[in-house]
Image (tube, grey):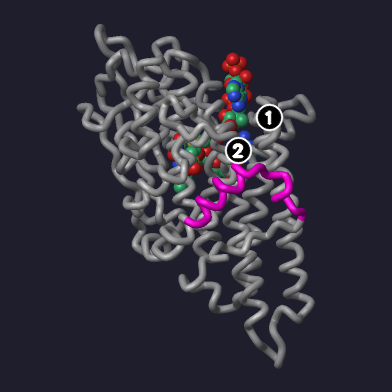
Amino acid sequence: PDLFEAPDYYNLDDLFSEEHKLVRDAARQWVKRDISPIIESYAQKAEFPKQILGGLAEIGAFGPYIPETYGGAGLDQISYGLIMQEIERGDSGVRSTASVQSSLVMYPIYTYGSEEQRKKYLPKLATGELMGCFGLTEPNHGSNPSGMETKFKDAGDHYLLNGAKLWISNSPFADIAVVWAKNEDGRIQGLIVERGMDGFSTPETHNKWSLRASATGELIFDNVKVPKANLLPGKSGLGAPLGCLDSARYGIAWGAIGAAMDCYDTALRYAKERMQFGKPIAAFQLQQKKLAEMITEITKAQLLAFRLGQLKNEGKATTQQISMAKRNNVDMALKIAREARQVLGAMGITGDYSIMRHMMNLESVITYEGTHDIHLLITGADITGIPAFT
Ligand code: TGC
Ligand code: FAD
């Protein structure tokens, strides 16, 4: 009874297992208790609330689908999605921290790492004792990571790493970074770089109007000596980081639904209470149009995410299917945030309601993990057979 309103217009609950619902409700309760009351003030201060890390670990948000033998929660992909949905109902920045830790740090270590690397890092990443970040984007290479300039070379008993990454979520406080760099043959490989290594620094990026409760920064490598044992041996080439992005983008497709639900719930409640011209504004057709379109779009996005989750569970979801869901669902959430903000009139611009914070956050979400344009081009290339990136 004390949970959020949860729009479920097409009875998706009938399709979820008991485990899905338990996992979702635990995450929902935690967000309601530990995130919603504090997040606005952290966003205003532009500060990441570090005290939530233990709670994120407890609800299984760090490595939901990583096997329990490595400290993960051993859940399926739909549970992973539902956890992301509930967290992003609270804030996209908090969901970012969970996405990065799970899909961009634990996933590559689990999938491309050696057994020693898995044992050394995964259990501590699952509890939040160690926090990670993921360095792909560079100052000169965002949408085209294949052009990256960060490189490493063999220097006897270690590698020497040089270069810089920009816009890296969690970098200012991360203990380790999964960094993508080119070897002497120009082939992309992943390295685990640890805080404290000489020549490695992580300056914070300030002045963001979006994702303010998430810490974003740089990764700078100035002749960093990386032990050879820290190279991810399992996969090389751009496909290695892109494989991680598949997993993170999938989670974002669910997460965006959470942000949209929170905006819709807030707008619906407000519209029923706010009186103008002697009536609740929900009685006016123009406001009903907004609300009716919101629930329609949320419902379509839920069905897309659910079916994608089934395909992911079967190991059949393609990169292109994931792109479609990430693109559609984030765009849906951003449009709903903009409409919901208008339903609240002037109140919508204040931090007393979550809508404007969601709206600003979603401007990052529509850009990171592949921009809105790039995902359209991925669909375009898939259906025509003609890549239009260059
Ligand atoms: P392209 O020629 O298409 O592919 C290069 C190689 O990779 C293979 N491949 C994949 N392998 C595994 N999984 C996938 N999903 C794969 N997609 C492609 C492909 O077969 C090829 O292999 P090979 O053996 O032939 O070399 O590459 P391209 O250079 O043309 O680029 C394609 C493009 C533009 C779609 C890609 O570069 C792209 O997705 N760009 C967007 C970059 C991006 O999304 N960056 C995200 C950075 S991380 C982030 O934003 C975190 S925010 C986290 C948070 O806070 O939540
Ligand atoms: P650009 O690639 O310069 O694109 C600029 C514009 O040009 C966009 O509109 C784009 O769609 C368009 N464009 C580019 N290429 C084409 C084309 N071929 N055809 C048509 N249009 C095109 N990265 C990480 O590696 N790790 C992180 O943890 C991380 N966290 C982030 C957190 C935040 C808050 C933000 C904002 C970004 C984060 N990123 C991270 C970076 C993010 O992935 C990049 O911003 C994104 O990939 C786009 O790159 P760019 O910003 O350089 O834009």
> Which segment is the magenta one?
10-29
- Residue type at the position of mark 1: Ala
Q: Which mark is residue 53?
A: none
Question: Residue 45: image x %, image y %?
Answer: 34, 62
| Viewer-nearest residue: 269 or 142 | 269
Query: Label 2 CB, ligand 1: below 8 Å?
Result: no
264 drawn magenta: no
Q: Which mark is residue 250?
A: 2
**Residue receiving disc 1:** 317
| Viewer-nearest residue: 368 or 296 | 296
Dividing the picture into quadrants, the one containing residue 315 is: top right
Query: Label 1 CB, ligand 1: below 8 Å?
Result: no
Quadrant where the N terminus is found in the figure? bottom right
Left or right: 227 as drawn, with respect to 284: left
Rendered-image quarter of ligand 1: top right
Q: Residues within 10 Å of mark 2 (few under 14, many from 20)?
A: many
For marks 1 and 2, give the CA distance. Answer: 9 Å
Question: Residue 192: image x %, image y %?
Answer: 35, 24
Left or right: 26 as drawn, with respect to 124: right
- Residue type at the position of mark 2: Tyr
Above or below, comparing residue 312 to residue 359 in the picture:
above
Dividing the picture into quadrants, the one containing residue 228 is: top left
